[in-house]
């Protein structure tokens, strides 16, 4: 998709790509350093180097300076060792691949770091605005990060249950800013499909439908049918995922929990 945009074709044949903000990062990377993989990865590594820095700040804010340093060092060592084991595995994410996990983690850590300071400072309006912008940008890489929003709001209410008068205003501004950031992308996809689709159906929604169905021992048909529009395809995939959850919610919850634990 980045290469298509570089030659003036946009995202191709009116398609909805996944990770649009990461695609934009790749476009600017190629514009700055050229087409060489080594040069682009070197530039990406310089940008992703902010990740351990944010982890240090997060650890220091939450616990102490030594713990912040330890967390940052662990992240650095994890990426360093991943370079050596990558030839022997196909299921690993690190800074020398064109993948979105580390960029997403950067936005999440930044969101939590500013969120903690937002709570401690008594919910200043500007911090709420900033949190909304960060969350909106993160959603343009991975939509799943939206789960961080109810968590930070819950912590806000628990931390200052009797001093939350500024909280509704700041929270409202956060939601408005998030919506403002993602609105152009939703509008673009609505013009293409007639629905407010965030992610490409053949990637994100199809993956969820397939995973949830397989947890029930079912192998669904997730391929797009010849006469099926993008909106119809997305609706069918959503229905497959909903049916899988409804048929055995406990098994789905158990499978999702195991997946998170295994990734951790």
Image (cartoon, helix red, strand yellow):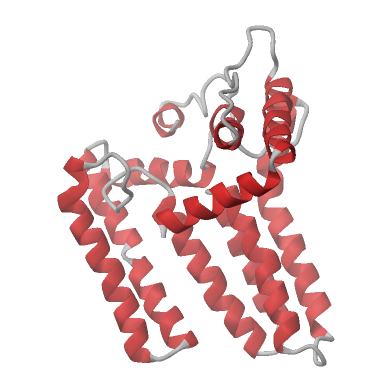
Of the 4 image quadrants, the one containing the C terminus is: bottom left
Q: Could you say where residue 130 lies in the image, as x and y percent from the top left?
A: 63, 70
Q: Which of 91 and 83 is in front in this view?
A: 91
Q: In this view, does 62 lie above or below 249?
A: below
Residue 64 at what x, y percent from top left? 40, 91
Q: In this view, does 164 lie to the left or right of 77?
A: right
- Depicted 198 relative to depicted 73: above or below: above
Using the rendered view, name the quadrant where residue 208 is placed: top right
- Between 23 and 237, the residue placed more toward the observer is 237
- Residue 186, how many percent across, how many down? 70, 40
Picture coordinates of residue 249, whole percent (x, y): 69, 45
Residue 4 lies, with reference to residue 99, above or below; the image says: above
- 15 left or right, relative to 165: left
Task: Report whether residue 94 is seen.
Answer: yes
227, above or below 158, in the image: above
The residue at the point 42 percent across, 82 percent down is 59
Query: Can see residue 140?
Result: no
């Amino acid at each position: 998709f980045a290469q298509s945009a570089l030659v003036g074709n946009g995202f191709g044949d009116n398609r909805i790509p996944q990770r649009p903000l990461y695609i934009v990062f790749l476009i600017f990377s190629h514009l700055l350093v050229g087409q060489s993989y080594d040069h682009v990865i070197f530039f990406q590594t310089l940008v992703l180097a902010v990740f351990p820095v944010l982890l240090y700040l997060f650890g220091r804010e939450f616990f102490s300076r030594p713990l912040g340093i330890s967390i940052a060092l662990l992240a650095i060592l994890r990426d360093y060792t991943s370079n050596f084991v990558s030839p022997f595995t196909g299921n690993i994410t690190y800074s020398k691949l064109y993948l979105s996990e580390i960029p997403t983690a950067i936005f999440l850590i930044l969101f939590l770091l500013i969120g903690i300071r937002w709570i401690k400072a008594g919910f200043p309006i500007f911090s709420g605005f900033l949190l909304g912008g960060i969350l909106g940008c993160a959603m343009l890489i991975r939509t799943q990060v939206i789960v961080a929003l109810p968590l930070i709001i819950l912590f806000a209410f628990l931390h200052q249950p009797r001093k939350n008068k500024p909280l509704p205003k700041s929270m409202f501004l956060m939601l408005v800013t998030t919506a403002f950031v993602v609105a152009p992308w939703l509008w673009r996809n609505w013009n293409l499909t007639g629905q407010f689709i965030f992610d490409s159906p053949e990637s994100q929604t199809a993956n969820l439908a397939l995973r949830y169905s397989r947890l029930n021992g079912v192998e669904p048909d997730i391929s797009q049918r010849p006469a099926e529009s993008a909106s119809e395809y997305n609706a069918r995939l959503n229905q497959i995922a909903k049916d899988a959850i409804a048929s055995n919610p406990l098994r789905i919850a158990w499978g999702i929990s195991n997946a998170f634990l295994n990734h951790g």
